[in-house]
Image (cartoon, rainbow, N blue to C red):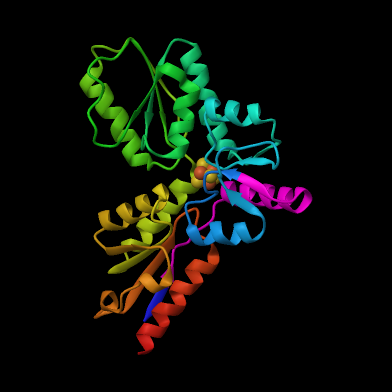
Amino acid sequence: MEILLAKDMGFCWGVRRAIDIMGRAAEEKGEIISVGPIVHNPQVVQQLQDKGIWTDTRPLDSSRPVAITAHGVGPDVLREVEETGAEIIDGTCPIVTRSQRWARKMADSGFTVLVFGDPEHREVKGVLGWAGRSGIAIEDGQPLPEKLPSKVAVISQTTQSPQRFSAFVARLMHERIGEIGELRLINTLCDVTSSQQAAARELAAEVPLMIVVGGKASANTRHLLEVCQEEGAAAYHIETADELQPEWLRDVDRIGVTAGASTPDSAVEAVVERVRKIARN
Ligand code: SF4
């Protein structure tokens, strides 16, 4: 069995940065509370908890520092934390911060801000918060709002694929050019995601089977699965090595492995080890 790894995969620098910031804070100050899971990966969340980084116990209070994750939060959550008087440890990824600033800037300039992404995702909720009442999240494939104002700004969830974002903008222009007087397009896509998606696509074109490792709630892991399927490979999304089913490997002599931006190297190594073990048997 030949096991090929994607050229770019796993923890992105934004997540590594947030984990470092929080790890240092926990070492210096004792237990800290993170607003939501630091990454969409239960195994990593457990490892961090062992180091004193706990996820969200409401109501928050001033007894322990409160950490903002790489996904960032909206101004309402920030205010809620500030009101407790707790020290804030900010692990927001700078690329997400940039997106939040653009959302606020565009909203303040009178634009309706369309955020292309999953409305239930924490990053999108945070960015929408900065756009205030001017923000609208639109998921891929969803209809556009019935009526659009004249000034429209479009930004994207950082982890969307460039192809989908550009297709969305093209659809917006095609369907609504008559209503829009001024359109501002801000590219808030993250290079890390694009590079990991390109690497997954390249590998999926070469192998019959792709295993995508990452938390079930991780949006960028799901997108990796989609790009692998688009290349025609059979592709499975697993969170841990034990989810890998031996029958997937039947009659397959080459498999590709990739992993979402919140997947630790140890999870990928465990999957590779299990593939080897199944192949040996
Ligand atoms: S995927 Fe990109 S935007 Fe998201 S945390 Fe990582 S570096 Fe930041």
Near-viewer residue (268 or 30): 30
Q: Position of residue 159 (x, y in %)?
A: 43, 43
Q: Position of residue 186 (x, y in %)?
A: 45, 26
Q: Is residue 191 left or right of residue 49?
A: left
Residue 160: say if magenta.
no
Query: In this picture, which residue range is highlighted in magenta?
Result: 4-33
Near-viewer residue (101 or 218): 218
Residue drawn 40% across the image and 53% down it: 221
Q: Quick check: 243 above or below 55? A: below
Picture quadrant of residue 169:
top left
Q: Position of residue 175 (x, y in %)?
A: 21, 22
Picture quadrant of residue 242:
bottom left
Q: Quick check: 235 above or below 65? A: below
| Residue lying furthest bottom | 281
Q: Can I make out residue 81 in this image?
A: yes
Near-viewer residue (39 or 194): 39
Near-viewer residue (267 or 120): 120
Q: Position of residue 229 (x, y in %)?
A: 27, 57
Pick the quarter of the image with the C terminus. Answer: bottom left
